[in-house]
């Protein structure tokens, strides 16, 4: 009795199979990468909400906002993440730095492993009692078209996103701000910030505390007037 002759895959058939497998794996990895990015974005948004609430609570307790932490201090150094001391005119290290995570009892970094940029108006962070019903911030938040979204803001916090442009790592090392003009604005240590819908070149996330909200919570807490 004769049997049909068995034959294996030809090189061409193997090449086709490998190409299909590679295509499927590539699509899977792309989807997993996109999913991971979306999860990190969502986690960072939640962190920014927690930070905003923590800043308000700090102000209610201390009648001022915290000063920034020193941005270039590595987290292995004693005192990293603590606010720099307030003085009559503002903060000993200036109004720009990173979120004082240790002072607030919050995580050091966003979901991408980078520190949050932090700027506070000097009049809101100076030696207590800093904040009064007449206090006015000096920070402006704009959109990409330079239209003001929020004016006279007392404090702003920035996550620099997946590309980390303009951010600091745990060792305090700074990343380049990159080519995007809006992200450069969020890392140049002035009083103007840009909040926009994310694009392929802009992935910063920003939160701020409006003066009216802050004063309102402090009134509710009985620390003003």
Image (cartoon, rainbow, N blue to C red):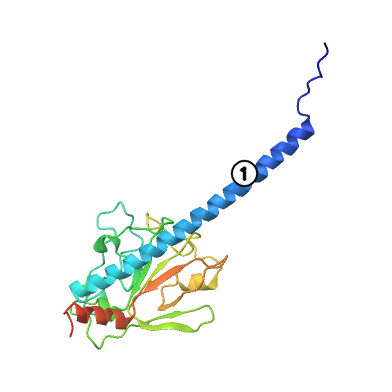
The residue that appears at 54% across and 55% down in the rendered structure is: 34
Image location of residue 204, percent across then percent down: 47, 67
65 w.r.t. 80: above or below? below
Residue 65 image point, x, y percent:
26, 74
Residue under label 1, please give it.
25
Residue furthest bottom in the image? 134
Q: Is residue 84 above or below residue 74?
A: below
Does residue 17 appear left or right of residue 144 in this picture? right
Query: In the picture, which quadrant includes the C terminus?
Result: bottom left
Element marked by disc 1 = helix
Vertical comparison of 183 with 149: above or below: above
Residue 106 appears in view: yes
In the foreground, 2 or 198: 2
Of the pair 70 and 103, the residue shown nearer to us? 103
Asked whether 12 or 117 is in front, the reply is: 12
In the picture, residue 222 is in which quadrant?
bottom left
Compared with 189, 140 (above or below) is: below
Q: Residue furthest front?
A: 1
Residue 109: which quarter of the image? bottom left
Residue 130 makes an appearance in the image: no
Q: Position of residue 179 (x, y in %)?
A: 56, 67
Extreme right residue here?
A: 2
Q: What crowding class fits label 1: few (fewer than 14 Cα within 10 Å), some (14-19), or many (20 or more)?
A: few
Q: Quadrant of residue 159?
A: bottom left
Q: Nearer the viewer, residue 59 or 217?
A: 217
Q: Is residue 55 left or right of residue 32?
A: left
Q: Number of labelled discs? A: 1
Residue 121, percent across and down?
32, 78
């Amino acid at each position: 009795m004769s049997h049909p002759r068995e034959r294996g895959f030809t090189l061409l058939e193997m090449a086709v199979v490998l190409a299909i497998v590679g295509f499927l794996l590539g699509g899977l990895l792309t989807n997993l990468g996109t999913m991971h990015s979306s999860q990190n974005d969502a986690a960072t948004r939640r962190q920014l909400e927690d930070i905003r609430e923590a800043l308000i609570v700090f102000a209610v307790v201390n009648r001022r906002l915290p000063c920034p932490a020193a941005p270039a201090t590595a987290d292995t150094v004693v005192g990293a993440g603590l606010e720099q001391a307030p003085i009559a005119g503002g903060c000993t290290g200036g109004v720009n730095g990173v979120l004082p995570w240790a002072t607030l009892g919050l995580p050091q970094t966003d979901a991408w492993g980078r520190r949050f940029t932090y700027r506070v108006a000097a009049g809101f962070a100076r030696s207590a009692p800093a904040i009064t019903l007449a206090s006015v911030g000096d920070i402006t938040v704009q959109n990409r078209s330079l239209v003001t979204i929020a004016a006279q803001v007392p404090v702003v916090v920035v996550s620099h996103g997946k590309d980390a442009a303009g951010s600091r790592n745990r060792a305090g090392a700074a990343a380049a701000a990159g080519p995007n003009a809006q992200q450069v604005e969020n890392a140049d240590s002035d009083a103007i910030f840009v909040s926009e819908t994310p694009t392929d070149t802009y992935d910063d996330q920003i939160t701020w505390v409006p003066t009216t909200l802050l004063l309102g919570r402090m009134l509710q807490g009985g620390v003003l007037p």
